Image (tube, grey):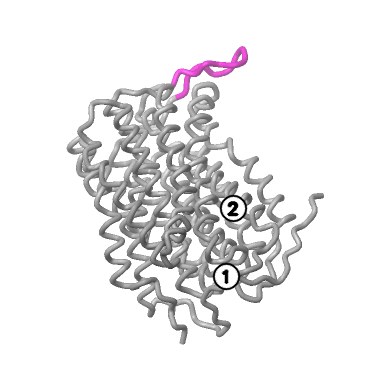
Amino acid sequence: MSKQLEPTETNDTQPLAGRWTICAMLFTATTINYMDRQVLSILKPILSGAVLHLDPLLPGWPAVETSIRLTDAQYGKVLAAFQIAYALGVVFAGRMVDRLGCRRGYPIVTGLWSLAAMGHALVNSIAGLSVARFLLGLGESGNFPAAVKATAEWFPPKERALATGIFNSGASVGAILAPLAVPWVALHFGWRASFLITGLFSALWIVWWSVRYRTPNIKTMGGPSDTASLAWWKLLRYRQAWGFMVGKFLTDPVWWFFLFWLPQYFSSRFSLDLSHLGLPLVAVYGMSSVGSIYGGWLPKGYMRLGVELKTARLAAMLTCACLVLPIVVAGGLHSVWLAVGLLSLAAAAHQGWSANIFTTASDMFPREHVGTVVSFGQVAGALGGAIFQPIAGNILQLTHSFVPLFVYSSCAYLAALVLLRVLAPGLKPAVMA
Protein backbone atom coordinates (compact mmCIF):
# COMPACT_ATOMS: atom_id res chain seq x y z
CA MET A 1 0.00 0.00 0.00
CA SER A 2 1.23 3.46 -0.81
CA LYS A 3 2.42 5.64 2.01
CA GLN A 4 -0.23 8.12 3.05
CA LEU A 5 0.39 11.83 2.87
CA GLU A 6 1.05 13.36 6.27
CA PRO A 7 -0.45 16.86 6.25
CA THR A 8 0.60 19.21 9.01
CA GLU A 9 -0.28 22.71 10.11
CA THR A 10 0.77 25.38 7.68
CA ASN A 11 0.53 29.04 6.94
CA ASP A 12 0.92 31.11 3.80
CA THR A 13 4.72 31.18 4.11
CA GLN A 14 4.99 27.41 4.72
CA PRO A 15 3.01 25.58 2.01
CA LEU A 16 1.99 21.99 2.66
CA ALA A 17 4.33 19.20 1.64
CA GLY A 18 2.61 16.78 -0.75
CA ARG A 19 0.30 19.39 -2.25
CA TRP A 20 1.44 18.66 -5.82
CA THR A 21 0.55 14.99 -5.39
CA ILE A 22 -2.95 16.16 -4.48
CA CYS A 23 -2.93 18.33 -7.60
CA ALA A 24 -1.97 15.28 -9.69
CA MET A 25 -4.94 13.34 -8.29
CA LEU A 26 -7.29 16.23 -9.06
CA PHE A 27 -5.86 16.40 -12.59
CA THR A 28 -6.46 12.67 -13.10
CA ALA A 29 -10.05 12.83 -11.86
CA THR A 30 -10.82 15.78 -14.15
CA THR A 31 -9.28 13.92 -17.10
CA ILE A 32 -11.55 10.92 -16.51
CA ASN A 33 -14.53 13.23 -16.02
CA TYR A 34 -14.05 14.86 -19.40
CA MET A 35 -13.38 11.63 -21.23
CA ASP A 36 -16.75 10.39 -20.03
CA ARG A 37 -18.66 13.46 -21.15
CA GLN A 38 -16.84 13.75 -24.50
CA VAL A 39 -17.70 10.31 -25.88
CA LEU A 40 -21.18 11.25 -27.10
CA SER A 41 -20.05 14.34 -29.02
CA ILE A 42 -17.41 12.33 -30.90
CA LEU A 43 -19.99 9.70 -31.82
CA LYS A 44 -22.59 12.31 -32.85
CA PRO A 45 -21.69 12.30 -36.58
CA ILE A 46 -22.43 8.56 -36.81
CA LEU A 47 -25.50 8.50 -34.54
CA SER A 48 -27.80 9.61 -37.34
CA GLY A 49 -29.47 6.39 -38.37
CA ALA A 50 -26.63 5.09 -40.53
CA VAL A 51 -25.15 1.61 -40.18
CA LEU A 52 -21.67 1.57 -38.69
CA HIS A 53 -19.47 -0.98 -40.48
CA LEU A 54 -17.05 -2.47 -38.00
CA ASP A 55 -13.58 -3.82 -38.59
CA PRO A 56 -13.85 -7.09 -36.65
CA LEU A 57 -10.77 -8.06 -34.68
CA LEU A 58 -11.80 -11.70 -34.22
CA PRO A 59 -13.47 -14.21 -36.56
CA GLY A 60 -17.20 -14.15 -36.05
CA TRP A 61 -17.19 -10.70 -34.42
CA PRO A 62 -20.22 -8.61 -35.58
CA ALA A 63 -19.36 -6.62 -38.70
CA VAL A 64 -22.17 -4.02 -38.57
CA GLU A 65 -24.03 -2.05 -35.93
CA THR A 66 -27.13 0.09 -36.30
CA SER A 67 -27.14 3.44 -34.53
CA ILE A 68 -29.73 5.68 -32.92
CA ARG A 69 -31.25 8.26 -35.27
CA LEU A 70 -30.13 11.55 -33.68
CA THR A 71 -30.90 14.91 -35.32
CA ASP A 72 -29.23 18.20 -34.36
CA ALA A 73 -32.36 19.37 -32.54
CA GLN A 74 -32.63 16.09 -30.62
CA TYR A 75 -28.94 16.23 -29.79
CA GLY A 76 -29.40 19.72 -28.37
CA LYS A 77 -32.21 18.44 -26.13
CA VAL A 78 -30.11 15.47 -24.96
CA LEU A 79 -27.33 17.90 -24.03
CA ALA A 80 -29.85 20.09 -22.22
CA ALA A 81 -30.90 17.06 -20.14
CA PHE A 82 -27.26 16.62 -19.10
CA GLN A 83 -26.89 20.26 -18.14
CA ILE A 84 -30.18 20.54 -16.27
CA ALA A 85 -29.14 17.51 -14.22
CA TYR A 86 -25.70 19.04 -13.76
CA ALA A 87 -27.31 22.20 -12.42
CA LEU A 88 -29.59 20.26 -10.07
CA GLY A 89 -26.82 17.98 -8.87
CA VAL A 90 -24.30 20.69 -8.20
CA VAL A 91 -26.71 22.44 -5.83
CA PHE A 92 -26.25 19.50 -3.48
CA ALA A 93 -22.78 18.35 -4.54
CA GLY A 94 -20.94 21.41 -3.27
CA ARG A 95 -22.75 21.30 0.06
CA MET A 96 -22.19 17.54 0.36
CA VAL A 97 -18.46 17.99 -0.21
CA ASP A 98 -18.36 20.80 2.36
CA ARG A 99 -20.09 18.54 4.90
CA LEU A 100 -18.40 15.19 4.18
CA GLY A 101 -15.04 16.61 3.21
CA CYS A 102 -13.08 15.90 0.05
CA ARG A 103 -11.78 12.52 1.17
CA ARG A 104 -15.23 10.95 1.46
CA GLY A 105 -17.24 13.16 -0.89
CA TYR A 106 -15.03 13.06 -3.99
CA PRO A 107 -15.07 9.23 -4.46
CA ILE A 108 -18.86 9.23 -4.13
CA VAL A 109 -19.40 11.62 -7.03
CA THR A 110 -16.71 9.88 -9.10
CA GLY A 111 -18.44 6.53 -8.70
CA LEU A 112 -21.83 7.99 -9.62
CA TRP A 113 -20.70 9.61 -12.85
CA SER A 114 -18.70 6.55 -13.93
CA LEU A 115 -21.68 4.21 -13.56
CA ALA A 116 -23.87 6.66 -15.47
CA ALA A 117 -21.32 6.96 -18.28
CA MET A 118 -21.16 3.20 -18.72
CA GLY A 119 -24.98 3.10 -18.64
CA HIS A 120 -25.03 4.82 -22.05
CA ALA A 121 -24.07 1.46 -23.56
CA LEU A 122 -27.49 0.06 -22.60
CA VAL A 123 -29.71 2.60 -24.37
CA ASN A 124 -31.82 1.89 -27.48
CA SER A 125 -33.68 5.17 -28.01
CA ILE A 126 -33.42 8.95 -27.78
CA ALA A 127 -35.40 8.84 -24.53
CA GLY A 128 -32.96 6.31 -23.07
CA LEU A 129 -30.03 8.42 -24.18
CA SER A 130 -31.57 11.44 -22.47
CA VAL A 131 -32.02 9.50 -19.21
CA ALA A 132 -28.42 8.27 -19.30
CA ARG A 133 -27.19 11.77 -20.00
CA PHE A 134 -29.29 13.17 -17.15
CA LEU A 135 -27.74 10.69 -14.71
CA LEU A 136 -24.27 11.52 -16.01
CA GLY A 137 -24.91 15.19 -15.33
CA LEU A 138 -25.96 14.43 -11.75
CA GLY A 139 -22.75 12.53 -11.09
CA GLU A 140 -20.32 14.86 -12.83
CA SER A 141 -21.67 17.90 -10.99
CA GLY A 142 -19.46 17.19 -7.98
CA ASN A 143 -16.06 17.20 -9.65
CA PHE A 144 -15.22 20.89 -9.63
CA PRO A 145 -16.65 21.81 -6.22
CA ALA A 146 -14.58 18.99 -4.72
CA ALA A 147 -11.43 19.82 -6.68
CA VAL A 148 -11.56 23.56 -5.95
CA LYS A 149 -12.20 22.85 -2.25
CA ALA A 150 -9.23 20.49 -2.12
CA THR A 151 -7.10 23.17 -3.76
CA ALA A 152 -8.23 25.75 -1.18
CA GLU A 153 -7.30 23.29 1.60
CA TRP A 154 -3.85 22.41 0.30
CA PHE A 155 -2.54 25.51 -1.51
CA PRO A 156 -1.77 29.06 -0.36
CA PRO A 157 -3.56 31.87 -2.27
CA LYS A 158 -0.57 32.74 -4.46
CA GLU A 159 -0.42 29.14 -5.81
CA ARG A 160 -4.12 28.39 -6.17
CA ALA A 161 -4.58 29.70 -9.70
CA LEU A 162 -1.62 27.64 -10.91
CA ALA A 163 -2.86 24.52 -9.10
CA THR A 164 -6.36 25.09 -10.46
CA GLY A 165 -4.92 25.59 -13.93
CA ILE A 166 -3.05 22.30 -13.69
CA PHE A 167 -5.99 20.19 -12.53
CA ASN A 168 -8.34 22.07 -14.88
CA SER A 169 -6.05 21.12 -17.78
CA GLY A 170 -7.33 17.60 -17.18
CA ALA A 171 -10.48 18.75 -18.99
CA SER A 172 -8.36 19.30 -22.08
CA VAL A 173 -6.38 16.09 -21.66
CA GLY A 174 -9.60 14.12 -21.30
CA ALA A 175 -10.93 15.81 -24.42
CA ILE A 176 -7.68 14.85 -26.21
CA LEU A 177 -7.68 11.22 -25.12
CA ALA A 178 -11.33 10.71 -26.05
CA PRO A 179 -10.96 11.44 -29.81
CA LEU A 180 -7.83 9.29 -29.87
CA ALA A 181 -9.51 6.28 -28.23
CA VAL A 182 -13.23 6.52 -29.04
CA PRO A 183 -13.09 6.26 -32.87
CA TRP A 184 -10.83 3.21 -32.70
CA VAL A 185 -13.05 1.50 -30.13
CA ALA A 186 -16.22 2.41 -32.06
CA LEU A 187 -14.88 1.17 -35.40
CA HIS A 188 -13.71 -2.16 -33.92
CA PHE A 189 -16.23 -2.94 -31.19
CA GLY A 190 -19.20 -0.64 -31.89
CA TRP A 191 -20.29 2.68 -30.43
CA ARG A 192 -21.74 1.13 -27.28
CA ALA A 193 -18.34 -0.17 -26.23
CA SER A 194 -16.97 3.37 -26.41
CA PHE A 195 -18.91 4.30 -23.28
CA LEU A 196 -17.24 1.57 -21.23
CA ILE A 197 -13.57 2.45 -21.66
CA THR A 198 -13.16 4.75 -18.66
CA GLY A 199 -14.87 2.64 -16.00
CA LEU A 200 -11.66 0.86 -15.00
CA PHE A 201 -9.76 4.15 -14.72
CA SER A 202 -12.42 5.54 -12.39
CA ALA A 203 -12.24 2.52 -10.09
CA LEU A 204 -8.45 2.77 -9.85
CA TRP A 205 -8.67 6.50 -9.12
CA ILE A 206 -11.14 5.98 -6.28
CA VAL A 207 -8.73 3.53 -4.62
CA TRP A 208 -5.80 5.93 -5.11
CA TRP A 209 -7.72 8.88 -3.62
CA SER A 210 -9.04 6.91 -0.65
CA VAL A 211 -5.55 5.70 0.24
CA ARG A 212 -3.63 8.93 -0.31
CA TYR A 213 -5.86 11.87 0.51
CA ARG A 214 -6.01 13.36 4.00
CA THR A 215 -7.57 16.66 5.07
CA PRO A 216 -4.75 18.95 6.21
CA ASN A 217 -4.71 20.52 9.68
CA ILE A 218 -4.72 24.12 8.54
CA LYS A 219 -3.88 27.07 10.78
CA THR A 220 -4.37 29.61 8.02
CA MET A 221 -3.77 29.70 4.31
CA GLY A 222 -3.66 33.46 4.12
CA GLY A 223 -7.17 33.87 2.68
CA PRO A 224 -10.49 34.97 4.14
CA SER A 225 -11.55 32.90 7.14
CA ASP A 226 -14.66 32.55 9.18
CA THR A 227 -15.58 29.69 11.47
CA ALA A 228 -19.18 30.65 12.11
CA SER A 229 -21.88 28.39 10.73
CA LEU A 230 -23.82 29.92 7.86
CA ALA A 231 -26.82 28.49 6.00
CA TRP A 232 -25.87 27.82 2.40
CA TRP A 233 -28.65 29.94 0.94
CA LYS A 234 -27.43 32.99 2.88
CA LEU A 235 -24.33 33.03 0.70
CA LEU A 236 -26.58 34.30 -2.08
CA ARG A 237 -26.84 37.60 -0.19
CA TYR A 238 -23.29 38.47 -1.24
CA ARG A 239 -22.57 40.34 -4.45
CA GLN A 240 -19.31 38.41 -4.77
CA ALA A 241 -21.25 35.16 -5.18
CA TRP A 242 -23.38 36.71 -7.92
CA GLY A 243 -20.33 38.06 -9.70
CA PHE A 244 -18.85 34.57 -9.79
CA MET A 245 -22.17 33.07 -10.92
CA VAL A 246 -22.71 35.57 -13.75
CA GLY A 247 -19.20 34.95 -15.02
CA LYS A 248 -19.86 31.22 -15.15
CA PHE A 249 -23.35 31.63 -16.65
CA LEU A 250 -22.04 33.57 -19.64
CA THR A 251 -18.81 31.69 -20.36
CA ASP A 252 -19.37 28.04 -19.43
CA PRO A 253 -21.72 27.53 -22.41
CA VAL A 254 -18.82 28.40 -24.72
CA TRP A 255 -16.72 25.58 -23.31
CA TRP A 256 -19.68 23.20 -23.54
CA PHE A 257 -20.03 24.33 -27.16
CA PHE A 258 -16.38 23.48 -27.83
CA LEU A 259 -16.81 20.06 -26.22
CA PHE A 260 -20.17 19.03 -27.62
CA TRP A 261 -20.37 20.68 -31.05
CA LEU A 262 -16.85 20.87 -32.51
CA PRO A 263 -16.96 17.30 -33.87
CA GLN A 264 -20.19 18.26 -35.64
CA TYR A 265 -18.59 21.54 -36.85
CA PHE A 266 -15.59 19.78 -38.38
CA SER A 267 -17.79 17.04 -39.84
CA SER A 268 -20.34 19.35 -41.48
CA ARG A 269 -18.08 22.27 -42.41
CA PHE A 270 -15.07 20.34 -43.68
CA SER A 271 -16.58 16.87 -44.40
CA LEU A 272 -14.37 15.02 -41.93
CA ASP A 273 -15.53 11.50 -41.09
CA LEU A 274 -15.05 9.64 -37.81
CA SER A 275 -11.60 8.35 -38.75
CA HIS A 276 -10.36 11.90 -39.57
CA LEU A 277 -11.88 13.90 -36.71
CA GLY A 278 -9.21 12.95 -34.20
CA LEU A 279 -6.29 15.14 -35.30
CA PRO A 280 -8.14 18.51 -35.44
CA LEU A 281 -9.82 17.81 -32.10
CA VAL A 282 -6.56 16.74 -30.49
CA ALA A 283 -4.92 19.96 -31.72
CA VAL A 284 -7.69 22.17 -30.29
CA TYR A 285 -7.95 20.42 -26.94
CA GLY A 286 -4.18 20.04 -26.69
CA MET A 287 -3.74 23.79 -26.88
CA SER A 288 -6.51 24.26 -24.34
CA SER A 289 -4.46 22.20 -21.88
CA VAL A 290 -1.49 24.51 -22.42
CA GLY A 291 -3.78 27.49 -21.92
CA SER A 292 -5.08 26.14 -18.63
CA ILE A 293 -1.62 25.82 -17.14
CA TYR A 294 -0.26 29.04 -18.60
CA GLY A 295 -3.42 30.93 -17.67
CA GLY A 296 -3.05 29.70 -14.10
CA TRP A 297 0.55 30.97 -14.07
CA LEU A 298 -0.33 34.31 -15.71
CA PRO A 299 -1.29 36.17 -12.49
CA LYS A 300 2.16 35.34 -11.08
CA GLY A 301 3.66 36.82 -14.23
CA TYR A 302 1.76 40.06 -13.72
CA MET A 303 2.76 40.06 -10.03
CA ARG A 304 6.42 40.00 -11.07
CA LEU A 305 5.71 43.34 -12.76
CA GLY A 306 4.65 44.74 -9.38
CA VAL A 307 0.90 44.18 -9.69
CA GLU A 308 -1.09 43.22 -6.57
CA LEU A 309 -2.50 39.64 -6.54
CA LYS A 310 -6.17 40.33 -7.21
CA THR A 311 -5.42 42.99 -9.82
CA ALA A 312 -3.13 40.46 -11.48
CA ARG A 313 -5.97 37.93 -11.43
CA LEU A 314 -8.30 40.37 -13.22
CA ALA A 315 -5.56 41.31 -15.71
CA ALA A 316 -5.08 37.63 -16.55
CA MET A 317 -8.82 37.24 -17.11
CA LEU A 318 -8.85 40.29 -19.40
CA THR A 319 -5.99 38.82 -21.42
CA CYS A 320 -7.87 35.56 -21.86
CA ALA A 321 -11.10 37.35 -22.81
CA CYS A 322 -9.33 39.25 -25.58
CA LEU A 323 -7.75 36.09 -26.99
CA VAL A 324 -11.19 34.55 -27.61
CA LEU A 325 -12.35 37.41 -29.86
CA PRO A 326 -10.90 36.11 -33.19
CA ILE A 327 -13.27 33.13 -33.33
CA VAL A 328 -16.01 35.52 -34.44
CA VAL A 329 -14.97 34.62 -38.02
CA ALA A 330 -14.74 30.83 -37.50
CA GLY A 331 -18.22 30.11 -38.86
CA GLY A 332 -17.27 31.29 -42.35
CA LEU A 333 -13.80 29.74 -42.73
CA HIS A 334 -12.91 27.40 -45.60
CA SER A 335 -9.54 26.21 -44.26
CA VAL A 336 -9.74 23.45 -41.69
CA TRP A 337 -6.33 24.28 -40.21
CA LEU A 338 -7.06 28.00 -39.96
CA ALA A 339 -10.20 27.00 -38.06
CA VAL A 340 -8.11 24.70 -35.88
CA GLY A 341 -5.70 27.57 -35.14
CA LEU A 342 -8.40 30.04 -34.10
CA LEU A 343 -10.30 27.46 -32.07
CA SER A 344 -7.09 26.33 -30.38
CA LEU A 345 -6.38 29.89 -29.30
CA ALA A 346 -9.94 30.37 -28.05
CA ALA A 347 -10.02 27.03 -26.19
CA ALA A 348 -6.67 27.81 -24.54
CA ALA A 349 -7.95 31.23 -23.53
CA HIS A 350 -11.12 29.73 -22.07
CA GLN A 351 -9.14 27.33 -19.91
CA GLY A 352 -6.90 30.16 -18.72
CA TRP A 353 -10.02 32.15 -17.90
CA SER A 354 -11.53 29.16 -16.11
CA ALA A 355 -8.46 28.61 -13.92
CA ASN A 356 -8.68 32.21 -12.74
CA ILE A 357 -12.44 32.57 -12.30
CA PHE A 358 -12.50 29.40 -10.17
CA THR A 359 -9.80 30.92 -8.01
CA THR A 360 -11.84 34.07 -7.41
CA ALA A 361 -14.18 31.96 -5.26
CA SER A 362 -11.38 31.16 -2.81
CA ASP A 363 -10.13 34.75 -3.06
CA MET A 364 -13.46 36.13 -1.90
CA PHE A 365 -14.87 33.51 0.50
CA PRO A 366 -13.63 31.51 3.51
CA ARG A 367 -12.44 28.03 2.62
CA GLU A 368 -15.31 26.36 4.53
CA HIS A 369 -17.74 27.97 2.06
CA VAL A 370 -15.70 27.60 -1.13
CA GLY A 371 -17.30 24.31 -2.21
CA THR A 372 -20.77 25.81 -1.88
CA VAL A 373 -19.89 29.02 -3.74
CA VAL A 374 -18.25 27.03 -6.53
CA SER A 375 -21.37 24.89 -6.74
CA PHE A 376 -23.44 28.07 -7.23
CA GLY A 377 -21.20 29.00 -10.15
CA GLN A 378 -21.45 25.50 -11.57
CA VAL A 379 -25.24 25.70 -11.37
CA ALA A 380 -25.20 29.02 -13.19
CA GLY A 381 -22.83 27.68 -15.86
CA ALA A 382 -24.90 24.53 -16.35
CA LEU A 383 -28.12 26.54 -16.66
CA GLY A 384 -26.42 28.76 -19.22
CA GLY A 385 -25.45 25.62 -21.12
CA ALA A 386 -28.94 24.15 -20.79
CA ILE A 387 -30.31 27.28 -22.46
CA PHE A 388 -27.55 27.38 -25.09
CA GLN A 389 -27.62 23.73 -26.25
CA PRO A 390 -31.20 23.44 -27.59
CA ILE A 391 -30.88 26.91 -29.13
CA ALA A 392 -27.69 25.75 -30.87
CA GLY A 393 -29.39 22.56 -32.07
CA ASN A 394 -32.35 24.44 -33.51
CA ILE A 395 -30.12 27.06 -35.18
CA LEU A 396 -28.06 24.35 -36.84
CA GLN A 397 -31.06 22.32 -37.94
CA LEU A 398 -32.74 25.39 -39.45
CA THR A 399 -29.77 27.31 -40.88
CA HIS A 400 -26.90 24.77 -41.01
CA SER A 401 -24.67 27.67 -39.94
CA PHE A 402 -22.34 27.98 -36.96
CA VAL A 403 -21.90 31.75 -37.42
CA PRO A 404 -24.36 32.91 -34.70
CA LEU A 405 -22.81 30.49 -32.19
CA PHE A 406 -19.28 31.76 -32.81
CA VAL A 407 -20.44 35.39 -32.58
CA TYR A 408 -21.81 34.79 -29.09
CA SER A 409 -18.74 32.81 -28.04
CA SER A 410 -16.37 35.59 -29.03
CA CYS A 411 -18.12 38.26 -26.93
CA ALA A 412 -19.12 36.30 -23.82
CA TYR A 413 -15.88 36.70 -21.85
CA LEU A 414 -15.56 40.47 -22.05
CA ALA A 415 -19.20 40.83 -21.02
CA ALA A 416 -18.66 38.45 -18.10
CA LEU A 417 -15.56 40.32 -16.92
CA VAL A 418 -17.37 43.66 -16.95
CA LEU A 419 -20.22 42.25 -14.86
CA LEU A 420 -17.83 40.52 -12.44
CA ARG A 421 -16.04 43.80 -11.80
CA VAL A 422 -19.34 45.63 -11.28
CA LEU A 423 -20.63 43.04 -8.79
CA ALA A 424 -17.33 42.31 -7.04
CA PRO A 425 -15.02 45.35 -7.42
CA GLY A 426 -11.43 44.41 -6.83
CA LEU A 427 -12.43 40.86 -5.77
CA LYS A 428 -12.76 42.11 -2.19
CA PRO A 429 -13.40 39.35 0.40
CA ALA A 430 -16.99 38.91 1.48
CA VAL A 431 -17.58 40.18 5.01
CA MET A 432 -19.33 37.20 6.56
CA ALA A 433 -22.13 38.05 8.97
Magenta-drawn stretch contains 63: yes
Is the magenta region chiefly helix, strand or loop? loop
Q: Residues within 10 Å of mark 1 (few under 14, many from 20)?
A: many
**Farthest front residue in view:** 305
Q: Amino acid at mark 1?
A: Asp
Q: Residue 195 or 299: which is nearer the viewer? A: 299
Q: Position of residue 305 (x, y in %)?
A: 42, 59
**Left or right: 97 as drawn, with respect to 71:** right
**How far apart in space, not on screen, are marks 2 and 1 (Cα)?**
17 Å
Q: Position of residue 403 (x, y in %)?
A: 20, 40
**Left or right: 329 as drawn, with respect to 155:** left
**Farthest right residue in view:** 1
Q: Please give the name of the residue rendered at 64% of the width and 64% of the height, measured from the top-left corner.
A: 15
Tag 2 and tag 1, C-beta contact below 8 Å:
no
Q: Residues within 10 Å of mark 2 (few under 14, many from 20)?
A: many
**Left or right: 119 as drawn, with respect to 412:** right
Residue at the spot of label 1: 98
Is residue 111 at least partly visible in the picture? no
Q: Amino acid at mark 2?
A: Leu
Magenta-drawn stretch contains 229: no
Please, is residue 304 above or below residue 344 in the view? below
Q: Please give the name of the residue rendered at 20% of the width and 44% of the height, measured from the top-left corner.
A: 404
Q: Position of residue 161 (x, y in %)?
A: 49, 58
Q: Residue 386 or 181: which is nearer the viewer? A: 181
| SS for dot 2 | helix
Q: Position of residue 137 (x, y in %)?
A: 46, 52
Earlier residue among tags 2 and 1: 2
Identify the mark at residue 26; answer none if there is no mark: 2
Q: Please give the name of the residue rendered at 48% of the width and 74% of the height, measured from the top-left corner.
A: 365
**Which region of the structure is painted magenta?**
52-65
